[in-house]
Amino acid sequence: MSGAAFKRRRSMTHAMIHGALVATCLVCIVPLWLIISASFTDEQALVERGFRLIPAKFSTEAYRFLLADPAQILRAYSVSVLVTFSGAMVSLFLMSMLAYALSRRDFSLRKVLALFVFFPILFNAGTLPFYILMVRQLGLKDNLLALVLPPLVLPFFVLLLRTFFSNIPRELIEAAKLDGASEWLIYFRVVVPLSTPALATVGLFSLLFYWNDLYLSLLFINDKSLYNLQYLLYQIIANIQLLEEGFAGQGLKPPLQSVRMAMAVLAMGPVLFAFMFVQRYFIKGITLGGLKGD
């Protein structure tokens, strides 16, 4: 094959790969754009003409409806941000330390601790014992700790980190020990810098878990000042549905569909912002942490 033919074939291959990547990006972006477009579409036009890339009839009614009381939205945002970032940081710290201990073959209690960590994956006591523990024993009804404590240690993420830590060469840890480093120093100065992709990936998953959590608020939060964003939006949708049923006989229709889309836009903004900082570690963290068993 001549050099010119090889270059043409390579150019065609690159063009096909780029085309496939562009198509994949469009598949991911178009649904998000449709949600944004629908949130700025008049409710009647949305019902009659459906979702469009460009609003059939531009309207900000959905956002005016949601932001009629901006104080409650800001308060819910502040609760979600506080719970999400504090919970994700503490959760990542605890899970990484636990996973590192489980990855050390010289740790005498390794198997016993692993049993306590991974047993809940197979067996779950159920909602009622969980509720009794949190409310009656710990007294966490209408307390933000009820939103932070339960997801602090998630067994799947511990397993992912343990597998990643097991791939770190033992020689590095032994060399640090010979230099007189303590276990804490080895963890912070050797293990953590080498585990940035896995830690960033698990940190993102933990952040998403806290941000999207609605279940814990449904169980433990009645105080409106402690509503997180997801629970507040859930309550708004429930109220809109009640309004729709109440005004059905009068021919009035609140903006239910467009409000749902506006809620999605408000809820996904911070998550997309956080993903921008960790996306370069995302694939590497998943692949390196999921290849080798222990």
Image (tube, grey):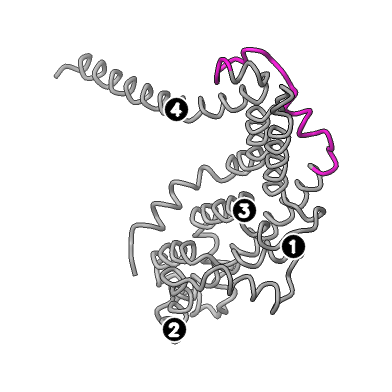
Q: Nearer the viewer, mark 3 or mark 4?
A: 3
Q: Is residue 26 above or below residue 195?
A: above
Towards the viewer: 228 or 211: 228
60 drawn magenta: yes
Work out whether mark 4 precedes mark 1 in sequence or the reverse, and give the earlier one: 4
Which span of residues is magenta-colored? 48-72
Q: Which mark is residue 112?
A: 2
Residue density around tag 2, few if under 14, some if 14–19, many if 20 or more, within 10 Å: few
The residues bearing labels 2 and 4 have C-alpha atoms spaced at a distance of 46 Å
**Mark 3 and mark 4: Cα distance apart in space:** 26 Å
* Residue position for label 4: 27
> How far, Cα to Cα, is label 4 from label 1?
38 Å
Residue type at mark 2: give it.
Val
- Give amino acid for label 1: Leu
Q: Quadrant of residue 288?
A: bottom left
- The disc labelled 3 sits on which kind of residue? Asp
Q: Quick one: SS at disc 4?
A: helix
Which is in the foreground here, disc 4 or disc 1? 1
Residue 24 location, x and y as percent? 41, 28
Q: Nearer the viewer, residue 221 or 251?
A: 251
**What numbered label is drawn on residue 73?**
none
Sequence order check, earlier mark of 2 and 1: 2
Q: Is residue 203 above or below residue 65?
A: below
Calculate the distance from the C-alpha at mark 1 to the C-alpha at mark 3: 13 Å
